[in-house]
Image (cartoon, coloured by chain):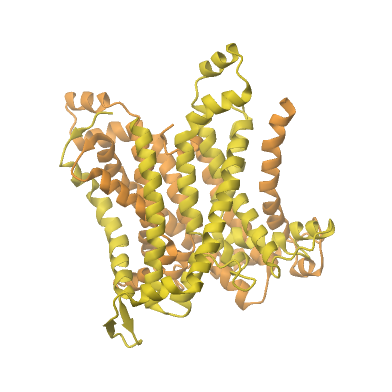
Amino acid sequence: MRISKWLVPTLYILFLMLPIYWLVSMSFKTTNEILGGFSLFPQNFTTENYAKIFTDPTWYWGYFNSLAYVSLNTLISVAAALPAAYAFSRYRFLGDKHLFFWLLTNRMAPAAVFALPFLQLYSSIGLFDTYLAVALAHTLFNVPLAVWILEGFMSGVPKELDETAYVDGHSFPSFFLKIFLPTIAAGIGVAIFFCFMFSWVELLLAKTLTSVEAKPIAAVMTRTSSTSGYELGLLAAAGSLTIIPGAIVIWFVRNYIAKGFALGRV
Amino acid sequence: MNKTVNQKAWFLVLPVVILVAFNALIPLMTVVNYSVQETFGDNTFFWSGVRWFEQILQSDRFWASLGRQLFFTFTILLIEVPLGVAIALTMPKKGPWVSVCLVLMALPLLIPYNVVGAMWNIFALPDIGLLGKLLNSIGFDYNYTRQTGDAWFTLILMDVWHWTSLVVLLAYAGLVSIPDAYFQAAKIDGASSWKIFRFIQLPKMKRVLTIAILLRFMDSFNIYTEPVVLTGGGPGNSTTLLSIDLVKIALGQFDLGPAAAMSLVYFLIILLTSWIFYTLMMRNEEQ
């Protein structure tokens, strides 16, 4: 019984790590070695692929571009979601339930449906190929999610906290910023994590709304595989690097991650 | 929590409403516009009524994509949900290993979709990929770029790899919220581990599992980038899911009318199913 308890999670984690290992191992191989045949470990260990990424501006700017619109999106989404989540968790108002479901429907909207209209919309207001365009487009699914998560966390905070603060003479903004936000810091952390995650992994909209200036790293990768031959080593190195920001973010929120995935409502 | 009625709360939700309305309503209206109009490419549009809807609903191509989509979604739900629950049940509840497990398991969730596709593409290559080489060396004739069955196998395995952790994390969150006293009481009563699961753990996980199924349903129905990078919808059209077909029509052939009509049908299916789930979830919560 005890052994089987360890066996299942271990095997599962092993299964998760295998493709990642393969990608990372490939990133240290030369293209010749990759195409030449099958090898479990890099035979001629090389860092050439990484060197190429760090010296070629189209590559490393891809990372900056991605991080720029992801950060901007996270900031906008969480800032807009905070007051809304407070309203949903504390008050009843005309159409509140319908509004909540309508927000959620946008989390369900297939990006494929919105790709073309988004291209036309953002081109017509002159935002095409800017960080702001991608950041705003990603609020479509991140704002509803942030509202959902934050509302869960805020509902867990007793209402007495609000009432005591008002008795103590706090105004709404002063209470909200100085008392309430620090209380739900964990929830804000989780919301930031999720917004970062979904903006970081999305590609269809990010690719559609950019061409040169704000092109995300993931799109730089697709272009490389088609124009300059099939440089698998380079592709693997670029792919391996995209795992790092995610890993860092998970490490920061590891203690809240389980609760966060349950949207604060366990 | 008993909420107070306060119509001024609308001011608090206003930023969100403006932001989402800008992003959702304008594009949605564009789609609705296209779906009832005919154009010959010179920016003049003619009213065409429900012609595109008829065309889409009568085309074999749409139903074939929808069929593949439904097959994909139900297969991954049938695998990921039970598997995720099983793994969550065996995970350690306390100690330093919890963080390690959680971080490693969450890792696939944070990899960009096209990197997931590219990763599995090279992982499964029959001659130089670990998985492909392994399957071939133990006697399977495996080649996902040529054989439909292998393409589906790889696609589903990739999705299981990518998303089972989401179910695990949700189920785990539900499990750790059960007070120890429940288990002690069950022990005193001499309950079997199946009974503990059926009458204590499963009811406690009901809510999180509904969220898991809802999220997995929506996201698997919307899946686009991973299968495009992995198989490109092929071999032939055998793994062309709904969104891949839609993008082919809209951005590939620029058939705006049919693409828009298809978008709306597509969106309505997701909306209706999610609404049923959501209503069930909210009803549970009120009890």
Q: Position of residue A85 (x, y in %)?
A: 30, 41
Q: Position of residue A132 (x, y in %)?
A: 36, 62
Q: Is residue B165 above or below residue B244?
A: above
Q: Position of residue A136 (x, y in %)?
A: 35, 60
Q: Is residue A195 above or below residue A113?
A: above
Q: Position of residue B155 (x, y in %)?
A: 62, 59
- What shade does chain B have? yellow
Judge by depth and name the residue closer to the eye, A165 or B287.
B287
Judge by depth and name the residue closer to the eye, A132 or A112.
A112
Seen at 71% across and 40% down, the residue is: A11
Seen at 63% across and 63% down, the residue is: B118
* Location of the N terminus of chain B (image quadrant): top left
Tell me, yes or no, if residue B9 can be seen here.
Answer: yes
Q: Is residue B236 above or below residue B202?
A: below
- What shade does chain A have? orange
Q: Is residue B259 above or below residue B197?
A: below
Seen at 41% across and 34% down, the residue is: A265
**In which quarter of the view is residue A13 placed?**
top right
Judge by depth and name the residue closer to the eye, A139 or A99.
A99
* Location of the C terminus of chain B (image quadrant): top left
Tell me, yes or no, if residue A114 can be seen here.
Answer: no
**Residue A198 as seen in the image, left or right of residue B158:** left
